Amino acid sequence: MLRRTICQADVELELEPVDPILIKSGYSTIDGPDMVPVVTYRSGDREYYFPGSSLKGVLRSHLERIARTLKPASVCIPYYDRRRDIKVPVDSERNSDGCSYRARGDNDSSSESYADSCAACRMFGSLKFGGRFSIGDAYPVPGHSPTLEQRNGVGIDRFTGGTVSGVLFDLQALTGGKFRTHVRVLNFELWQLAALNILLLDLQDELISVGSGRSRGLGRVKGSVTKYNLSYVPRTEHVAGLFDFATDEEKTQYQLHDWSPDSPIQLAGGSRRGLRSVFDLTSDWTERLSPLAPSFEQFLNWHGGPKGDVSNRNREEANA
Ligand SMILES: [Zn+2]
């Protein structure tokens, strides 16, 4: 995308499990992306961490839910391709084939792919491009390792509601601890910065759950922002996004969203690091950046949802 760095947001995040996080060992779950801690050994000690890829999956599905609530069918269902005969139970989402399976023609350029992609794919990527949002693995803060206990679950027959003899599954429950990770959004549009803040605030308010049994209200995590920096290569005195720095041609090719807050959000006291000016918003990002919030819904309405024709991707690819 644009092949140059213009702006980026860097956030340091601490995650604390509020409830025990259930991990079903040896099972993959079918109720959406699971954020399962993974064990590793560091200087001889067992240590649990949350892989960045699964954190990204949880945050993506949370943002997708918000987007569908604000505007039905505004984001794709990433792995849904109607040619594979998968049934989508909700009427309003029946045309929400994954952006990965859509195209204008045989060889879409990266700007066309970006322009046609839904909000979630523009933010988190698809099979066609990497997306702007990245998050690292979350490791325990020294001195704040979680504890892990073994629990046994009993298999329940879904038909009779009784127990099934011989079906015992292993559950591990992770409690306590504090994990630290880093989030980056590169070359953001202002609505993407708004989307990042929505996710951070929902983490802060314990609205995001991880692990197995999320539907039973388990696995809430609290996220606290310990650092929030915005960096710009071009000079700016207010919070700006990609649209403000792109050429007219880029604005059209990439279909960048033309939006700015009612009055400019001032940036002051930046420090120069190499080519970048870095602004530290750690102490007041929630209030200072709150005027950006409406831009997310306005983007969804303006963009209209995933574009590109499903039939333009060839069948062999769909069946591969
Ligand atoms: Zn999409």
Image (cartoon, rainbow, N blue to C red):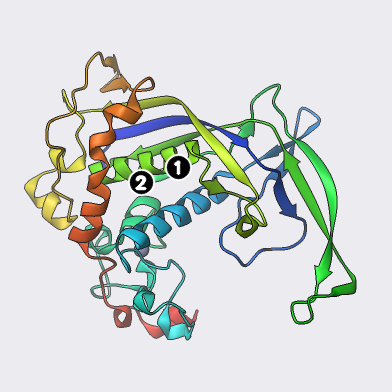
Tell me the crowding category of disc 1: few under 14, some 14 to 19, or many 20 or more residues within 10 angstroms, Cα based.
some
**Does 210 sit above or below residue 145?**
below
Q: Amino acid at mark 2?
A: Arg
Q: Residue at x 42, y 62 (%)?
A: 127
Give percent across and percent down for residue 181. 54, 33
- The label shown at residue 202 is 1
Q: Amino acid at mark 1?
A: Asp
For the residues marked 1 and 2, what is the alpha-carbon distance in whole angstroms?
Answer: 20 Å
| Mark before the other along the chain sequence, 1 or 2 | 2
Residue 238 quadrant: top left
Judge whether residue 241 can be spotted in this image: yes
Judge whether residue 2 can be spotted in this image: no
Give percent across and percent down for residue 61. 47, 57
Q: Is residue 320 left or right of residue 295?
A: right
Q: Residue at x 72, y 50 (%)?
A: 22
Q: Residue at x 36, y 82 (%)?
A: 314
